[in-house]
Amino acid sequence: MSLSRLRPNAARLMGTSALVLAALTCLPACREGTRKPEAPGKADTARTQLLGAAGSCVLTTARDFLATAVELKQATAALAAEPDASKRAAARAAFHRAMDVWQVAEVMQVGPAAPRSLPGGAELRDNIYSWPLVSRCVIEEQIVSRGYEASGFPTSLVSRRGLFALEYLLFYEGADTACPASSPVVSGGRWAALSAEEREARKRAYAAVVAADVHRLAAQLVEAWGAEKGGFVRTLETAGPGNAVYSTGQKGLNALSDALFYIERDVKDLKLARPLGLRDCSADTCPELLESPFAGRSKANVRANLVGFRRLAEGCGANYEGTGFDDVLVAAGAEPLAVRLRERLSEAQAALEAVDEADLREALAQDKPSVRALYDAVKGVTDLLKTELVTVLDLEAPQNLEGDND
């Protein structure tokens, strides 16, 4: 019986003492004043655990990248100082090791790595690797002007620096330029005036400057996440009241889910759909739109992107053990969705390994259906991400995905 019905019944009982009636009347307010705070629910606890685990995962990945950035800086400096075939090979190998780690970090654009428009964003990612905002011509303009010597990149455009510029400088051996005929580089004859030896010497010097800048930015990223006092790991794991960046735990969780959408925007739509001719391409295929045109690692990049996604979605430990978004789904009562997410991620990984060719460029030419199967498998993951996962966890999809129904 409800209290609202109990009160009039008690008032009509002639033998009931006034004290009993008063106690009944006071009951709701008295209970409110003495009620103990409710313990956090399973979903809240899982969310808090995920925020802490994800922050530690991002920091570990950033530290791994910093270690490779040190090697890359040393290898490019050695190549610039005393060029030979073995030093070029060493510099290229160091680049591949750095990119193997960075492409994992690409899916972890939270806080300092994120754009300045997002909470806690410091835009370090774009300065380290700006793809798809890249320009070969801009790099070649720097080769002609030797602008890399004076600037040191403190305020330079992102398209002049970072890992894409380094890929061109270390791997492209052609003598041509991508600049249009109207460009001063071409119309003024400045590119043509460079001898092959001078052009290569400038590329090596430019590469050493770029690698040193990447190392500097990598160190900044580690410091931003791992500072002993106030590091972003702490910011993320304490999301909630009093947190200047994420005033609620849900906002922290939303920042992580925004990072996951890299696999939708960049992997599915840009790295796979465009070269496959599914969008922004009027031909059967557009291999020129692949991510890694000089080092030939477009397949390796997607592999690393899946690793980064799985570390956040399933767990950052060995074999993806640990706390991930799947654990938050289970705690929210959506274990079947968590199971399907893990299954589809395994399917995407299997589809990538089924591409026999070393790079997607060769695969598009020799076995396009295998690349399409990879696209379909990745789409299976992103379909869950942008529909069921965001709905169950009450998340907001990134604004730039609005209206995207593919």
Image: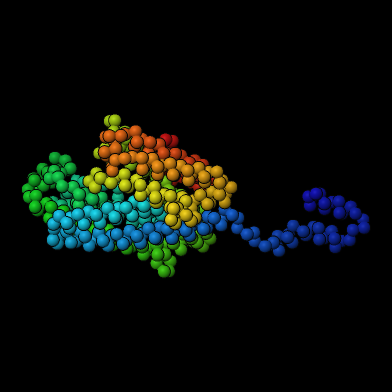
What x and y, as percent, mark residue 328? 53, 51
- Residue 21 falls in image quadrant: bottom right
Toward the viewer: 358 or 129?
358
Q: What residue is rendered at 81% in x and 61% in y?
A: 23
Residue 42 falls left or right of residue 103 = right
Q: What residue is rendered at 14% in x and 62% in y?
A: 81
Toward the viewer: 1 or 24?
1
- Residue 356 seen anywhere in this rendered image of the structure: yes
What x and y, as percent, mark residue 137? 19, 46
Question: In the rendered view, would you say 395 is above or below 245?
Answer: above
Residue 195 falls left or right of residue 297 = left
- Residue 82 falls in image quadrant: bottom left
- Residue lying farthest to the right in this orientation: 15
Residue 36 falls left or right of residue 222 = right
Question: In the rendered view, would you say 211 is above or below 130?
Answer: below
Q: What residue is rendered at 71% in x and 63% in y?
A: 34
Toward the viewer: 206 or 42?
42
